[in-house]
Image (spheres, rainbow, N blue to C red):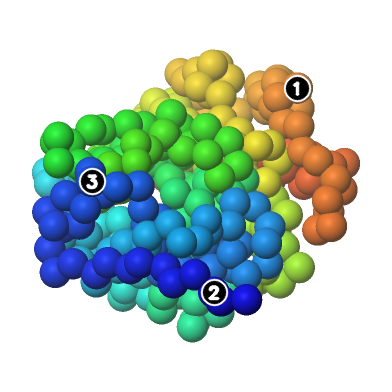
Amino acid sequence: MVEKITTTYRFDRLDQTLSQLNREECTIMAGGTDVMVLHKSGRGVPLKLPKPLVFIDHLSELKRVYQNQKDLHIGACCTYSELLEHPLIPVPLKNAIKTIAAPAIRNRGTLGGNICNASPAGDTLPLLYVYNAKLLLRSVKGDRMVAISDFIQGPRRVQRNQNEILAEIILPSVLADGAHVVFEKVGNRNADAIAKVGFAGYIRINDARIEDVRFAFGAVGPTMVRSIDIERKLVGKTIPLADADIAQVVAAFDKIIRPIDDQRSTATYRKTVALNLLRYFLSMKQYQAN
């Protein structure tokens, strides 16, 4: 049996790449750390060979990190290793990146790939949700901005047109002072393991009152679990929070966190850990002292 040859493209510029995507449907290849595993294992959505491949990991237009006022712009093809070394990347995001796989994978894997892979256990995703990340999608027809919560629609399902590339991840006001952000990942190991539960919490306090608060959970549903309605219940509350306020928020999330049993963990374990992480975050002394 003769194997079919796959057409591959590797253009020097982003505009050339976008023109090709506008001409035909292609599989976009950045770091390839997820795409190739799926293809070789036959799980998920394998590459539909001989569907053309377009390589984008080398494009300088997709590897910039810069500040625009208080917003942080991160190129979608920045590797995890590059982000770990960059001075503008927030410490909580660096902490999340350190839990991703081994150094060899971090040298190839990209932040944009972690988003477009849309795994419920994506390591950076809970943080990106609480940072209210916006995604800049680019095509020959122009740019389109979409919230990450709208872009990720389910396991490995995203709101990307076939002629678009995820160009930038924008974290609004992430460089502003006053917010306390935490990230927690529970797995078999501190790194190089798929998360059983991921959690990110964000809180900003002024004069002992909560001005803004956000929570996101990973690996406990088909997408990240976040509820702005529940978060709003805490805005204006005085720190330290009363036990009744904490219990009310935990009970509200108990109703919407719906994990599953799989080879890595049980649904009961996942829900218990997720709610405990939330309860611990709401009781933390670090931000209460600020």
Of residue 277 and residue 10, the one placed in the foreground of this image is 10
From the viewer's perspective, is residue 106 above or below residue 271? Answer: below
Q: Secondary structure at mark 2?
A: loop
Residue 145 on image: x %, y %: 25, 33
Please indicate whether residue 288 sits to the left or right of residue 193 in the image. Answer: left
Asked whether the residues under the numbered discs 3 and 1 touch, taking CB atoms below 8 Å apart as contact, a structural biologist would say no
Asked whether the residues under the numbered discs 1 and 2 touch, taking CB atoms below 8 Å apart as contact, a structural biologist would say no
Residue 125 on image: x %, y %: 50, 48
Cα distance between the residues tagged 3 and 1:
46 Å
- Label 2 belongs to which residue? 3
Instruction: Report the amino acid beneath label 2.
Output: Glu
Of residue 254 and residue 79, the one placed in the foreground of this image is 79
- Label 3 belongs to which residue? 23
Cα distance between the residues tagged 1 and 2:
50 Å
Other-residue count near label 3 (Cα within 10 Å), few / some / many at <14 / 14–19 / ≥20: few
Please indicate whether residue 191 sits to the left or right of residue 142 in the image. Answer: right
Other-residue count near label 2 (Cα within 10 Å), few / some / many at <14 / 14–19 / ≥20: few
From the viewer's perspective, is residue 247 above or below residue 183? Answer: above
Position of the N terminus by quadrant: bottom right
> Going from the N terminus, do you reach mark 3 or mark 2 first?
2
Instruction: Report the amino acid beneath label 1.
Output: Lys
Q: Secondary structure at mark 1?
A: helix
